Image (spheres, helix red, strand yellow):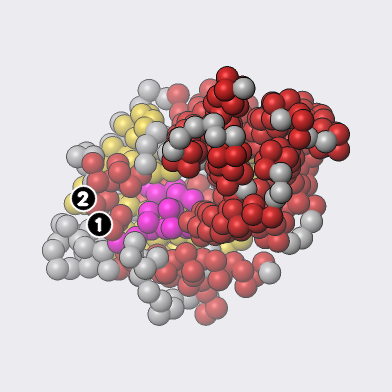
């Protein structure tokens, strides 16, 4: 009997490790999906983690009412396999077809957290009752914490890139059901036929879901997007979707549209060419963001450009728009141009660590939906970035909509107004806010900045532009009364008012 007890003890510690890995993966999947679909990753992850940990406490408390710990542990693994395994499919489908995603999200988090919380007390009871080892609780906790560490490391580096969120949840659901299956065999004298039947059902359901996960993804995507989805991938940074209908392509990152080929020229010409035309020198250009290569395409229209450095966090985006023929054609294969250097790194770190100086800097960054992106619109980011701009150079940033998020737009402008001028210490930067209409986005705004006392007279624009002219730009600098300047706070990493302005502005229009 001693050998049997030792074998069961070793298995239960191994099961603790595996269950800890699966539990944290479910928690990270819930946080990732909610940040993809609902925005503000800091808030979403904070809420998910807080509710999950509280629910684990409830599960641990409820374990005292389980009379047969072997049966309770096995049942918790069956239910975790089913609920956790189908968590990502349920969330994506619910977002596409149902209202009230928050209620569904936190119901799943509470259920998964409570079931995970049952694990340690029940395993500890089983080991104690069988006198399987000394230092029972410390051994169980060690296995549990080690599993959590492994999950935290593997999730961004292996699980999401190789499986994607949908297949990952179903794969780890099968892992929980494997633990349950071994437990059914080890504790067969205490496991009834009803529980065995539930295990078989869960195993078949998760296996079928994994086999058909691509179809589930397609079903969810059909609810999100009007056109045919030709590419859908999850990376450690975001969910990438490209749709196609006739000659029209659209790119979505985390559900937010980045461009539509019907009108992207309006956005990219307005972003790039006013700054390029006013810079006295254009040999070295830096673009932060813009991994789709559209801004690079516009920069390369200027014959005197010698070098373009593109800094974009996600290597998968730049790979797709450089190497995939249909997508590379959209940017005129600009990312393969020998003048272009692609750096896949964080723009925040680049601004602080680079020693290079550029003639023009173009910020084609995502909207400040959360604190992680908001810091790229802060004084603390703009100040070191100004050190990367030549004293006579020009910088420009997309700044959101002065209509849909009016306070957010003018907060970006105010942030530039309060940023240190390294070329003229004690004097303010010179800046010009402007806006234009892009059908896919609505009225969209930009801010152009220089360290000089005024902008230089623009040179002639490239001849093959589809939209922009100097006359059109002059009109862009005029703001109607309902989208004009407001007395708002500048953005800093200590307070991040920009996130609140952005969320409140869009919520007022969309809710």
Query: 18 or 439: which is nearer to us?
Result: 18
Q: Quadrant of residue 338?
A: top left
Task: Name the residue rendered at 49%, 48% in the picture.
Answer: 269
Number of the label disc, if any, that sits on residue 383: 1
Residue 239 position by quadrant? top right
- Magenta residues span 359-379
Binning the other alpha carbons within 10 Å of mark 2 as few (below 14), some (14 to 19) or many (20 upward) gives: many
Q: Position of residue 313 (x, y in %)?
A: 43, 39
User: What residue is shown with label 2?
Assistant: 387
Q: Is residue 228 visible?
A: no
Viewer-side residue, 479 vs 91? 91
- Kindly report the distance in space between the C-alpha atoms of the residues bearing marks 2 and 1: 7 Å
- Above or below, comparing residue 24 to residue 52 in the picture: above
State the SS at label 2.
helix
**In-image side of 13 versus 224 (left or right):** left
Quarter of the rendering occupied by the N terminus: top right
Quarter of the figure with the C terminus: bottom right
The percent position of residue 392, horizontal first and vertical second, equals 21, 51
């Amino acid at each position: 009997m001693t050998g049997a007890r030792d074998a069961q003890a070793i298995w239960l510690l191994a099961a603790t490790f595996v269950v800890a890995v699966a539990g944290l993966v479910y928690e990270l999947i819930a946080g990732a999906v909610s940040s993809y679909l609902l925005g503000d990753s800091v808030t979403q992850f904070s809420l998910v983690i807080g509710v999950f940990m509280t629910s684990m406490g409830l599960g641990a408390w409820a374990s005292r009412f389980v009379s047969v710990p072997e049966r309770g542990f096995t049942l918790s693994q069956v239910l975790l396999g089913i609920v956790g395994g189908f968590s990502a499919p349920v969330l994506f489908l619910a977002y596409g077809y149902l209202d009230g995603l928050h209620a569904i999200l936190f119901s799943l988090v509470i259920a998964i957290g409570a079931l995970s919380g049952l694990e340690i007390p029940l395993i500890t009871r089983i080991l104690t009752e069988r006198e399987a080892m000394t230092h029972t609780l410390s051994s169980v906790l060690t296995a549990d914490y080690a599993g959590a560490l492994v999950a935290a490391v593997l999730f961004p580096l292996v699980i999401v890139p190789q499986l994607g969120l949908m297949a990952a949840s179903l794969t780890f659901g099968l892992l929980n059901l494997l633990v349950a299956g071994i437990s059914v065999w080890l504790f067969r004298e205490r496991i009834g036929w009803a529980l065995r039947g539930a295990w078989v059902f869960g195993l078949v359901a998760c296996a079928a879901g994994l086999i058909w996960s691509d179809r589930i993804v397609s079903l969810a995507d059909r609810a999100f997007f009007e056109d045919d989805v030709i590419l859908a991938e999850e990376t450690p940074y975001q969910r990438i979707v490209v749709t196609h209908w006739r000659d029209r392509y659209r790119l979505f990152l985390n559900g937010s549209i980045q461009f539509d080929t019907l009108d992207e020229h309006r956005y990219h010409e307005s972003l790039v060419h006013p700054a390029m035309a006013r810079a006295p020198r254009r040999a070295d250009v830096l673009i932060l963001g813009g991994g789709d290569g559209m801004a690079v395409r516009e920069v390369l229209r200027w014959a005197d450009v010698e070098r373009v450095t593109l800094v974009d966090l996600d290597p998968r985006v730049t790979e797709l728009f450089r190497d995939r023929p249909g997508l590379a054609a959209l940017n005129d294969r600009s990312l393969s141009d020998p003048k272009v250097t692609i750096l896949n790194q964080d723009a925040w770190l680049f601004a602080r660590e680079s020693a290079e100086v550029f003639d023009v800097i173009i910020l084609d960054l995502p909207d400040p939906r959360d604190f992680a992106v908001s810091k790229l619109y802060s004084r603390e980011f703009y100040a070191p970035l100004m050190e990367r701009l030549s004293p006579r150079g020009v910088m420009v940033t997309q700044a959101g909509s002065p209509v849909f998020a009016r306070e957010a737009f003018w907060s970006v402008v105010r942030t530039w107004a309060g940023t240190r001028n390294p070329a003229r210490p004690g004097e303010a930067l010179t800046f010009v806010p402007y806006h234009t209409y892009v059908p896919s986005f609505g009225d969209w705004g930009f801010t152009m900045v220089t360290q000089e006392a005024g902008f230089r007279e623009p040179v002639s624009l490239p001849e093959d532009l589809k939209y922009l002219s100097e006359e059109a730009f002059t009109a862009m600098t005029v703001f109607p009364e309902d989208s004009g300047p407001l007395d708002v706070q500048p953005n800093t990493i200590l307070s991040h008012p920009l996130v609140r302005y952005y969320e409140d502005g869009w919520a007022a229009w969309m809710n």
